Image (spheres, rainbow, N blue to C red):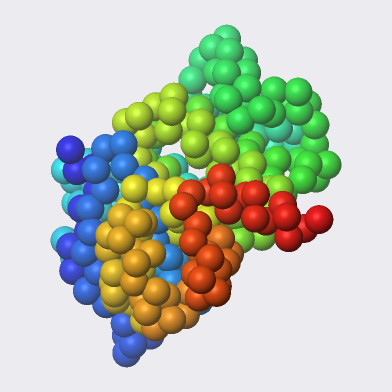
Amino acid sequence: MKLIEVNNLVFSYDKKINVVDGVSFSVESGKYISIIGHNGSGKSTIAKLLIGLLEANKDSIKAFDMELNAKNLRAIRQRVGIVFQNPDNQFVGSTVRDDIAFGLENRQIPHDQMDDIINKFAAKVNMLDFLDKEPENLSGGQKQRVAIAGILAMNPDVIIFDEATSMLDPKGKREVRESIELMRKENPNLSIISITHDLEEAFSSDEVIVLQKGKIVADDNPENILEKPGIFVESGVDLPFKNKFLNLLSQAGIEIKNDESLERIVEELCR
């Protein structure tokens, strides 16, 4: 079932140069799609178009069998959540508990039901012990996990991650990736769109879309994308470290059969 359909999407900020130029793709129920590309490729603009923060050209985006327009925008946003790049800009509550409750209050969830919902989704992202903490005392990864809990509490069909790990350290990136994996296990019908520079994350998805100057230059599963390294050179996207390392080993005549072998080699090199 297609939840979102994008057909020949075009957008320009200055009405002269198309930042997004003829982009088409669809998001099916339960699918995890990553959109990658160099800065300025149009990927974050697509995220904003998908939730109506920017106005797309007419009849180019359909969500849940509705055209994305002013009439349907509220209904669509109730089924789509977004986690933004800067976790500090997402908090509206004085505590973690207040922040998760904010969306529930907007949905007019009865207060006597809120605590159970807040506890449930805070636990899912391992933030149950932090509910009474102030957001400024959390790490970047913890803040993003709170943002994810707040979105999950709204029970969306689609979650968009707009460069949600780009400002995080490796530990924070790993925490967000683990949260995504857990979400997918617990709700196989949840669809995810990740706008990302983190190729380790991108290659955990079902489908990778590569953008260059507003156009799609590749759209395939991660395994097939990795077999076309020229795509990364052309689009200005760097290969994941593991793959670059494997390529170097291959050039040196060293064959790696699986990730376990790779881990042993890395351990030997680090001794």
Along the viewing direction, whichever of 83 and 91 lies nearer the viewer: 83
For the point 51% across and 31% down, the residue is 182
Residue 75 spot, x, y in % from top left: 30, 39
133 sits left or right of 118 in the view: right
Q: The N terminus is located in which quarter?
A: top left
Kindly indicate the quadrant of the structure image that contains residue 15.
bottom left
From this view, report whether residue 173 is shown above or below residue 182: below
State whether residue 85 appears in this view.
no
Q: The C terminus is located in which quarter?
A: bottom right
Along the viewing direction, whichever of 80 and 250 lies nearer the viewer: 250
Residue 69 spot, x, y in % from top left: 25, 55
Along the viewing direction, whichever of 232 and 45 lies nearer the viewer: 232
Residue 126 spot, x, y in % from top left: 66, 28
For the point 56% across and 36% down, the residue is 179
2 sits left or right of 170 in the view: left
State whether residue 225 appears in this view.
yes
For the point 75% across and 36% down, the residue is 94
For the point 26% across and 48% down, the residue is 27
Counting every numbered tag in the picture gives 0
Residue 80 spot, x, y in % from top left: 38, 42
From this view, report whether residue 97 is shown above or below residue 139: above
Q: Residue furthest toward the front?
A: 253
Q: Residue furthest toward the top?
A: 112
Kindly indicate the quadrant of the structure image that contains residue 165.
bottom right
From this view, report whether residue 8 is shown above or below residue 262: below
Q: Residue furthest toward the bottom?
A: 16
256 sits left or right of 45 in the view: right
